[in-house]
Amino acid sequence: MDAGKLLAYLKAADEMEHGGAEFYKAASGWVKDGNGKALLLFLVKEEERHALVVEDLIRLVKAEAGGSAGRISEMERPHFFRPISEYSAMVKDADTPDDVVFREAALTEQKSIDYYQKCARIAGEHAGIFRRLVAEEKGHLEYIRDSQDSFKVSGYWLGIDSYFSLD
């Protein structure tokens, strides 16, 4: 893949990560459960960290190629996020706001996985970074699904610390 096209994909990935952080930050205000808020704020930090990785890769590719970003068609550009006001309206109208957050968070992570898998297939020597991001996004999706399962059974989100305990 030429550097210009790779840069275009990376810029779209950067937008995706910033959009994910914005969504999770807003979503943390829509849930009442403390564990839910903690998980969503953890995901804000994760998306911000991913954005930094992508931005570093953009700088690296630019330095190597000495060029500017190419263009990707609208069919190739990921469309991940609605305006926050639309999500907010969905939450407001929902019987259980948490269900909307779970659904939209799972969609966010799945779309990220799909996009990064596509990038890994076309990124050449930079494919490893995208594969690593796929693995991290899959972990996020697991956190969301496990917490959703906990919520269905107990009415409470699973705490993010459950994933990092030594037990």
Image (cartoon, rainbow, N blue to C red):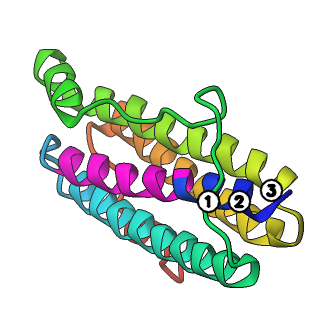
Above or below 63: residue 11: above
Q: In the rendered structure, find residue 120 and report the number of the disc placed on it.
A: 3
Mark nearer the N terminus (1 vs 2):
2
Q: Quadrant of residue 133?
A: bottom right
Kindly indicate whether the residue at mark 2 contacts the one at mark 1 (C-beta within 8 angstroms).
yes
Q: Which residue is mark 2?
A: 4
Locate residue 44, reporting x and y percent: 33, 62
Secondary structure under tag 3 reads helix
Callout 3 environment at 10 Å: few (<14), some (14 to 19), or many (20+)? many
Quarter-of-image position of residue 54: bottom right
Q: Nearer the viewer, mark 3 or mark 1?
A: 1
In terms of secondary structure, where does tag 2 sit? helix
* Point 82% across, 65% down: residue: 127
**How far from the left and from the top, in percent, is residue 8?**
62, 53
Tag 2: residue type? Gly
SS type, badge 1: loop
Q: Which residues are magenta?
A: 12-28
- Amino acid type at circle 1 is Ala
- The answer to which of marks 3 and 2 sits earlier in the sequence is 2
Amino acid type, residue under disc 3 in the picture: Ala
Residue located at (26% from left, 63% from top) = 38
